[in-house]
Image (cartoon, grey):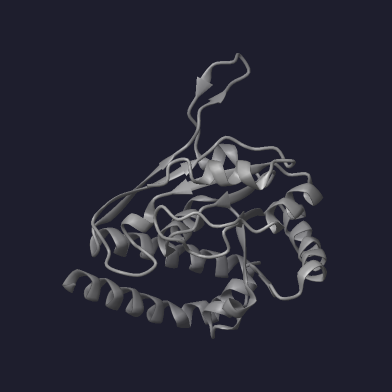
Amino acid sequence: MLRDFFFNASLFLWFALWAPLLLVGLISQKLERKFILADAWGVVFLARAVAGIKYEIHYPLLDDENGIPFKHNINQRFDGRAIIASKHMSMLEVAILVTHVPNYFFIIKRELLWIPIYGWAFKRIGLIGVNRTRGATNMHTLGEKVTKNIMKGMILIIFPEGTRVVPGQRVKLKRGLLFLANQLKLPITPVGVDTGLYWPKRGRTKPGTAHIYFEHELPSTATLDEVNEAINRHSC
């Protein structure tokens, strides 16, 4: 209980201290992205230093030109030519993805862009807000906005579950992921996480090592069942 109090208090202070810098960063997208990156690294640091939550990232083996498997890192693998579809359990995987995926952007609820300062910063760096009540019309507009970012070499990260889930929970994935993959002709890289065991949506944090699992790419024609299976492969 005491650990959670100090952790939440430290996060509140951290976000408050960064708010003035994010205001300054609005003058330049490049500068704002640097500030957001440093802010996210701070979240990862506080999770470890205060809550005792470390993390490990696991990448699948790939074959080189001779067919020999080799390990790679995120900078070697992602160049904007894939959509990253991640399971969503915690703020932790958001911070980890922000600090490890270069030139990222997210699709988020448009209400998050209305948050003073932080919402403005999110919009400045290219995050796209959606109105989930507008159906097909919204998806058409969304596709145009995503295409513009992809053409700039940005990497789309999407949480197809649409919300944070608790460990062991499976929810129906949003079909928007398949719409975008088919429209952009981009493969899908599923990402599984177990962060909810340590920093849950609700409840107390727990010290330990969280895991982020990058899976092998799926084609743009993959089904929701295939994506669901991949992002839940390592679920607890």
Task: Name the one closer to the observer, 65 or 234.
Answer: 234
Measured from the top left, where is residue 124 in percent x and y?
Answer: 63, 73
> Is 107 left, or right, of 231 in this rendering?
right
Q: Residue at x 72, y 51 (%)?
A: 178
Q: How many marks?
A: 0
The residue located at (49%, 68%) in the rendering is 35
Q: Residue furthest bottom?
A: 116
Which quadrant would the N terminus be assigned to in this image? bottom left
Q: At 67% across and 44% down in the image, what residue appears? A: 82
The spot of residue 77 in percent (x, y) is: 58, 38
Residue sticking out furthest to the top: 66
Quadrant position of residue 76: top right
Q: Is residue 163 left or right of residue 51?
A: right
Name above or below for residue 57 compared with residue 172. Answer: above
Q: Is residue 217 above or below residue 16?
A: above
In front of the other: 37 or 89:
89
Q: Residue furthest left?
A: 2
| Residue 179: % across, % down | 76, 54
Find residue 163 and report its horizontal and vertical position in percent: 53, 65
Q: Quadrant of residue 81?
A: top right
